[in-house]
Structure formats: C-alpha cells, structure tokens
C-alpha cells in the first residue's frame, strides 16, 4: 500500500473526517465510472459508490485493509455493484413482465395472466436455487448481456469456467422446470 494511502486508511480508522474527504475526492469520480461499467445507469453507479463510502465511514474502526486502499475501494464497489444487480434482477423482470402483459391484456384472460405470473415465479425460483456463483454468471450473461470474457474479469475466474457455470446453470434450470411441470401435469 502506498504511504499516502496507508496514512489515509489509518487516519480514517482514527475518525479523521479530513482524511475521509481526501479519499472520497481522490477516488469518487473514477469509482463512479468503474461502477457504471457494471450498472445500467450513472445514477445507480453513484449510489453504489456512495453506499461504499458510507459503509466505510460507519465501520471505520474495523477498517482492515490488507491491499492498497485503491484496490480495496475498487473491490468494494465491484462487490456492491454485483449485489445491486442480483437484488434488482427479480424486480426488473417483474416490471418487464407487467409491461408486456399489460400491452396484451385485452387478448388474455385472467387465467392466462395468472399462469404467466406463476411461470415467471417458477423461473425466478429455479434461478434463485442455483449456487451463488453459477447464478451470478448466468444472470450477467443472459440478462445483462455480458460476454464470457467480461464475466470472467468481474468474477475473477477463467472464461472456460464461466462457460461451464452457464452450461451447468442451463442444465439445472431445464431439469428443475421440467420436474415442476411434470408434477403439475400429474
């Protein structure tokens, strides 16, 4: 860790608002740009970066940085952005579904809408049942359009591992959904 960064971290841990402001001003803009690479909005990227800084300040006494302060901040922003993506997945999918079904509501009966909602819930449950890293790779690729290489960089794994995780996710989803539909037909 650079001397200045190490001093800033020690000062923040001791409660120095001035050191915290210096770190904030030194890294805020570039961290927002970094977060925007993951998220679909500059406002969301700013929110994520602000959440990271707020969390650091609130937990400053326990601040334990074993790498450079800059690396620590980038890792924290990356993790927070990925958590934000996971959290917003279900909400975004439901809103898309509502928009889509409202355009066709005149043509669909209440029963059809109910079945579509049930199907959407089944798919979301099956995705939620995936192991965390497999679910993350799947969602980043299928819902956010990231390439295997981009996902590999985000998750710090090889592109081949990403490919394997997505393949396993698809196999698992097919199996779970087939089982659910088979039970319903019985």
Image (cartoon, rainbow, N blue to C red):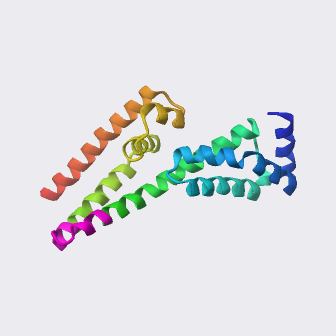
Q: Is residue 6 left or right of residue 39?
A: right
Left or right: where 18 falls relative to 113: right
Q: In the image, 175: left or right of 131?
A: left
**Magenta-colored span:** 99-113
User: Considering only vertical position in the picture, is 8 above or below 52?
Assistant: above
Residue 7 point in image, percent of width and height: 87, 42
> What residue do we see at 54% from left, 44% from top?
37
User: What residue is at 87 percent from the left and 49 percent from the top?
Assistant: 11
As for residue 33 lying within the magenta part, the answer is: no
Q: Considering depth in this image, is 77 or 133 the residue closer to the camera?
A: 77
Name the image quarter holding the N terminus: top right
Residue 104 colored in magenta in the image: yes
Q: Nearer the viewer, residue 65 or 17?
A: 17
Residue 16 seen in the current view: no
The residue drawn where x is 52% and y is 49% is 39
Of the 4 image quadrants, the one containing the C terminus is bottom left
39 vs 149: above or below = below
Residue 124: tell me if it is visible.
yes
Residue 70 coordinates in the image, percent (x, y): 73, 39
Q: Is residue 70 above or below residue 111?
A: above
Coordinates of residue 177 in the picture (x, y in percent): 24, 49
**Position in image of residue 64 (x %, y %):** 76, 44
User: What count of labels does the image hold?
Assistant: 0
- Dominant SS in magenta: helix
Looking at the picture, does residue 17 appear above or below residue 77?
below
Q: Residue at x 66, y 42 (%)?
A: 74
- Residue, far left: 186
């Amino acid at each position: 860790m650079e001397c200045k960064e190490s001093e800033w971290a020690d000062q923040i841990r001791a409660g120095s608002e001035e050191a915290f402001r210096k770190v904030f001003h030194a890294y805020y803009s570039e961290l927002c740009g970094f977060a925007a690479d993951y998220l679909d909005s500059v406002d969301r990227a700013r929110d994520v970066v602000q959440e990271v800084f707020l969390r650091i300040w609130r937990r400053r006494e326990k601040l334990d940085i074993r790498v450079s302060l800059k690396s620590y901040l980038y890792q924290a922003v990356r993790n927070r952005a990925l958590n934000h993506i996971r959290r917003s997945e279900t909400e975004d999918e439901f809103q898309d579904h509502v928009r889509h079904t409202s355009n066709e509501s005149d043509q669909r009966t209440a029963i059809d809408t109910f079945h579509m909602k049930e199907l959407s819930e089944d798919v979301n449950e099956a995705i939620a049942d995936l192991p965390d890293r497999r679910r993350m790779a799947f969602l980043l690729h299928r819902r956010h359009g990231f390439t295997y290489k981009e996902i590999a960089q985000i998750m710090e794994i090889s592109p081949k591992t990403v490919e394997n995780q997505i393949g396993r996710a698809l196999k698992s989803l097919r199996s779970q959904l087939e089982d659910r539909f088979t039970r319903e037909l019985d």
